[in-house]
């Protein structure tokens, strides 16, 4: 993994501030022990050490672990203990008071945070704390055509060539994009899934949302983002208009624009399956139910169809 990836994370002030505030609330100087799962450069573990943690255990499988150890030495941090490997590989790990993990992606679950936390609970002392604690996914209809136009270039290759098969694959994909609130149906954001990491969770997620259109509206797809409850009173959000982070929103396209009329019912159903072995697969199904009856417009997508 390129160091540029870690530079982007370290430049994310809302992210760093939220986790620092959470650690500050939990750490009792000289007493609290902490496990940083997926520690990367070690910044969260180093924060915990500087806040007075008794011992900090850093778990990281990537090559950045070597850099992390160099950084700890350069910063004279002496109470950090390094495990070079995935946390799930740790046998008889030291028990800790706090588990912290920032294994979040643009699609929050793409780095397998659910499975990682489920396994890491064996590290936790009775009464210990996991941060972050909750992840809520939101969805809203997209009413600006600029995102849709990007994906229609396959129709304009020219020279008498038909690239419709490539276009179909392109539409079975999700795209990292930055949305403005004006790109979305007004006041339309709805939660479609919530994960409470303190409880047992499945890595297979299903949910949906529905809207009754208040005016004639053309729908080009859906924007998806998340809000993370780091601790009560401390949140991180990738929503349009929220303080900018290194994460962005995601665009889930429609294959053709949906011509909604006032009173029509628009719905989207979403599924995702995440695993260490197979990565993350996401599916979304769109339906437009006409208020005055008639045929229901349906579109269905699967991320697995978007890859060669």
Image (cartoon, grey):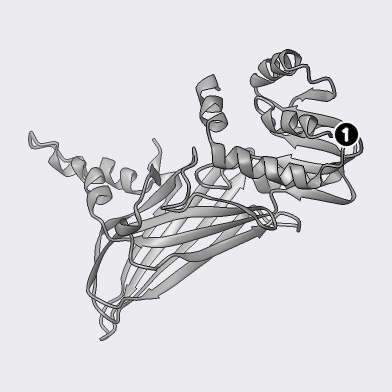
- Residue beneath the point at 75% across and 42% down: 23
Q: Which residue is mark 1?
A: 93
- Residue beneath the point at 46% across and 51% down: 242
Left or right: residue 28 versus residue 133 is: right
Left or right: residue 107 versus residue 181 is: right
Give the percent coordinates (x, y) of residue 88: 77, 36
- Residue beneath the point at 72% across and 32% down: 47
Q: Residue furthest bottom?
A: 292
Of 268 and 80, which appears nearest the observer? 80
Say which element carries label 1: loop
| Residue 112 seen in the current view | no
Of 301 and 130, which appears nearest the observer? 130
Give the percent coordinates (x, y) of residue 123: 85, 41
Of 174 and 76, which appears nearest the observer? 76
Q: Residue furthest left?
A: 159
As drawn, 51 above or below 290: above
- Asked where in the image residue 220 lies, by quadrant, the reply is bottom left
Q: Residues within 10 Å of mark 1 (few under 14, many from 20)?
A: some
- Quarter in which the C terminus is drawn: top left
Left or right: residue 47 versus residue 156 is: right
Of 135 and 1, which appears nearest the observer? 135
| Residue 45 seen in the current view | yes
Give the percent coordinates (x, y) of residue 141: 35, 62
Labels in figure, total: 1
């Amino acid at each position: 993994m390129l160091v540029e990836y870690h530079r982007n994370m370290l430049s994310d002030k809302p992210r760093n501030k939220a986790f620092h505030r959470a650690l500050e609330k939990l750490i009792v100087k000289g007493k609290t022990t902490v496990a940083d799962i997926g520690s990367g450069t070690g910044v969260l573990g180093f924060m915990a050490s500087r806040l007075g943690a008794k011992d900090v255990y850093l778990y990281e499988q990537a090559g950045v672990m070597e850099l992390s150890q160099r950084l700890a030495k350069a910063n004279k941090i002496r109470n950090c203990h390094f495990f070079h490997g995935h946390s799930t590989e740790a046998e008889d790990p030291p028990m800790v008071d706090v588990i912290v993990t920032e294994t979040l992606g643009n699609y929050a679950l793409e780095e397998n945070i659910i499975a990682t936390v489920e396994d890491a609970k064996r590290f936790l002392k009775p009464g210990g704390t996991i941060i972050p604690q909750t992840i809520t996914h939101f969805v809203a209809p997209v009413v600006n055509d600029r995102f849709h136009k990007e994906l229609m270039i396959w129709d304009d290759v020219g020279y008498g060539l038909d690239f419709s098969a490539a276009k179909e694959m392109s539409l079975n994909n999700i795209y990292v994009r930055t949305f403005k609130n004006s790109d979305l149906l007004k006041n339309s954001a709805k939660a479609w899934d919530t994960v409470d990491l303190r409880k047992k969770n499945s890595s297979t997620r299903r949910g949906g949302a529905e809207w009754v259109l208040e005016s004639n509206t053309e729908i080009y797809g859906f924007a998806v983002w998340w809000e993370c409850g780091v601790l009560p009173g401390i949140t991180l959000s990738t929503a349009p208009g929220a303080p900018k982070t290194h994460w962005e929103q995601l665009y889930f396209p429609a294959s053709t624009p949906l011509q909604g009329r006032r009173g029509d019912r628009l719905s989207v159903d979403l599924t995702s399956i995440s695993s260490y072995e197979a990565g993350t697969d996401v599916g979304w199904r769109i339906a437009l139910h006409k208020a005055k009856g008639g045929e229901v417009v349906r579109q269905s997508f699967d991320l697995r169809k978007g890859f060669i």
